[in-house]
Amino acid sequence: MKHYSAFAIAREALRGHTGWERAWRKASPKKRYDVVIVGAGGHGLATAYYLGKNHGIRNVAILEKGWLGGGNTGRNTTIIRSNYLQDPSAAIYEKARSLYETMSQDLNYNVMYSPRGVMMLAQTEHEVRGYRRTAHANALQGVDTQFISPERVKELCPIIELRGPRYPVLGALWQPRAGTARHDAVAWGYARACSDMGMDIIQKCEVTGVRSENGQVSGVETSQGAIDCGKLCIVVAGHSGHLAEMAGFRLPIESVALQALVSEPIKPCMDVVVMANTVHGYMSQSDKGEMVIGGGADGYNNYTQRGSFHHIEETVRALIETFPMISRLKMLRQWGGIVDMTGDRSPIISKTPLGNCFINCGWGTGGFKAIPGSGWATAEMVARGEPGPLAAEFCMNRFREGRFIDESVAAGVAH
Ligand SMILES: Cc1cc2nc3c(=O)[nH]c(=O)nc-3n(C[C@H](O)[C@H](O)[C@H](O)COP(=O)(O)OP(=O)(O)OC[C@H]3O[C@@H](n4cnc5c(N)ncnc54)[C@H](O)[C@@H]3O)c2cc1C
């Protein structure tokens, strides 16, 4: 892989950009791999990357039924934060956030990590108490957050309306090193690094069946033929239930559509991310100037990748009362992704009832921020056959044993 640098850009500018090579190789499936990963989203690609980088396992295929990064990884609103309440969540999300800080250098690919700060508005007394509690928990967990006053909120984000028609802003949970990154670049950067390590990324290759012998996984059936493998890792977000069924087990996952929208680009007016969870909407400004707006998840299970119309109306209403100046903006486009929700709104990183078959799913509405930490922890589990300290609490059995990692009440919203 040629090194990307300012010097390389200057050299290519002088020779008409004829020397750039493909970021990743086009691969056809081999007969057998040590590890097959299903799903070339951020979590699948990061798992492959850390398998190679941290554990020296490079005979790996990543199978993707569409195009890499075309699932939720390329559809999210790119918020990165680690201000979770429960210890296992704070540990894995903070690991991820800290890996984001150096990801561009690590991958030699600019993922445009922008630690601009994320604030979660407290608009009821209940939220004030909840976020103060989270700030105390974060202090013990080594996560840098503070509960800030309404005056400080206004200072950090002048376009905000503190006395909205329904709920006033009573303060906010502020994480100064949280922020955003470019979602496609995260997928592309990992893909380039995996390809450089000799791994095969095979697009338009749908897994249609899982093969096993004596209770151990032995391979997969795909739209490009059968592939044998020593270990299998399923990382397919909203399609996890289908893959689990192919492997012979059931998951406590529901798939729903979650949607987002962006406005026309405008001049810079907001350099933080604001989440207003009571009225339910959140917004940041992209480097192109568009206002990036996240909405709600459908209240019923579906695979539409669109989202219901009434959610757009609710989201826009919530944001207009929080930021009245956006009322005259035109919206450019809207889209949806299929998110994989667990009952406690925490992910699953786990061994499964099928030997040597592992699963990573359940990131729901908030897994972009977790990609590097999740990949790190999943690679460790696949390489060793057992989850390490970051993943151990996220096993599937917690639902049977009643050991929930309850972030649904803690965060109110998970993005
Ligand atoms: C609108 C929206 C906004 C969001 N906002 C945020 C946010 O601001 N911050 C945040 O942290 N998170 C956010 N999220 C959540 C985040 O996007 C996801 O949690 C994360 O991207 C999941 O990544 P993944 O790699 O698990 O899944 P995906 O990126 O969906 O990748 C799974 C891949 O598996 C492939 N696949 C499925 N079935 C098969 C098969 N049978 N064979 C082969 N391949 C298969 C799919 O095609 C897909 O490419 C948002 C999500 C949405 C939809």
Image: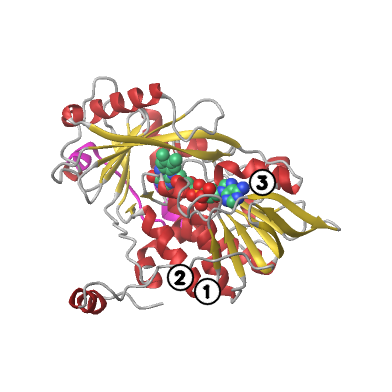
| Tag 3–tag 2 contact (CB < 8 Å) | no
> Which residue is denoted by mark 3 in the rendering?
243
State the extent of the magenta-drawn residues as a range: 134-154
Q: CA distance from mark 1 to mark 3?
A: 27 Å
Type of amino acid at the residue the image marks with label 2: Ala
Label 3 amino acid? Leu
Mark 3 crowd level (few <14, some 14–19, many ≥20, 10 Å Cα): many
Closer to viewer: mark 2 or mark 1: 2
Cβ of mark 3 under 8 Å from ligand 1: the answer is yes
Q: Nearer the viewer, residue 325 or 120?
A: 325
Label 2 and label 1: CA atoms lie apart by 9 Å
Q: Is residue 360 magenta?
A: no
Residue pointed to by mark 1: 53
- In this rendering, position of residue 233 left or right of residue 313: right
Q: Nearer the viewer, residue 373 or 23?
A: 23
Amino acid tagged 1: Lys
Q: Main secondary structure of the magenta part?
A: helix
Q: Relative to 346, does residue 114 appear above or below in the rendering?
A: below
